[in-house]
Amino acid sequence: AQTVTQSQPEMSVQEAETVTLSCTYDTSESNYYLFWYKQPPSRQMILVIRQEAYKQQNATENRFSVNFQKAAKSFSLKISDSQLGDTAMYFCAFMNRDDKIIFGKGTRLHILP
Amino acid sequence: ETGVTQTPRHLVMGMTNKKSLKCEQHLGHNAMYWYKQSAKKPLELMFVYNFKEQTENNSVPSRFSPECPNSSHLFLHLHTLQPEDSALYLCASSQDRGVWEKLFFGSGTQLSVL
């Protein structure tokens, strides 16, 4: 069965610091898709970044980047120059070619002033 | 704002009540979804609609009844719920039902079943 594991239930960092959220997954498929979603206190989940497994280049969106290690089945999210507005729950998600999306349990991130 | 609106924002209901959750998207998307978010559990997909047709039901109990009258609206009718059904119910939409589609979520309905 495909699973997504986020080993850090909660994290806190100072504003302007860099923080890395970890995510590992388990699958026997070779082609799939990975996502990071953010859920701020408003509860509205927003796509942060996505990565196609067949692309070796790590995806980047402004201050957000991923470290995709396919062999290790690892998909970590790095937030650079963290801002107070980055405070949220972050969910790692995996989608296979059958369009089944599986979410991790999330990491609660606090950015401290 | 993501263009997906859910009402009500909060709902408290007894186990014998009947209520409905509403979701509306203003994005011209063809696919709509219901998700359940329980505390300390991963997000669970409940139902998928594509072009108004239900394409997926993830073994959801019949006390949850979805309805999709058109591509812009999605309802979740609730009847005889259990306390363990208390959760945040999220609606989402995407342009189409495809692997690479970006999901747009609403703010959810926080449901409490007493």
Image (tube, rainbow, N blue to C red):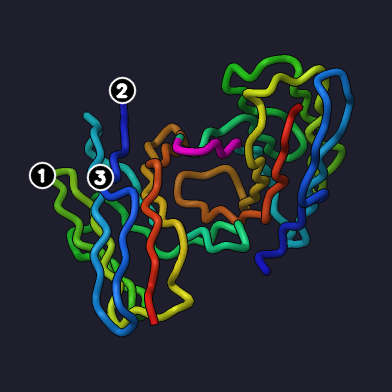
Measured along the vertical axis of the image, is residue A79 above or below residue A43? below
Instruction: Identify the residue at horizontal 76%, vertical 57% (top origin).
Output: B5
Quadrant position of residue B111: top right
Which SS does the magenta portion mostly show? loop
Instruction: Identify the residue at horizontal 66%, vertical 32% (top origin).
Output: B86
Q: Say whether mark 1 and mark 3 are on the same chain.
A: yes
Question: Is B37 contained in the magenta span?
Answer: yes
In the rendering, at what x and y percent does residue A8 appear? Answer: 27, 50
Q: Which residue is mark 3?
A: A7
In the rendering, at what x and y percent does residue A101 appear? Answer: 45, 38
Look at the image and tell me in which quarter the C terminus of chain A lies: bottom left
Look at the image and tell me in which quarter the N terminus of chain A lies: top left
Q: Which residue is mark 1?
A: A71
Q: In this rendering, which labeled residue sits more in front, label 3 or label 1? A: 3
Q: Of the residues shown, which amino acid type is indicated by label 1?
A: Ala
Question: Is B93 contained in the magenta span?
Answer: no
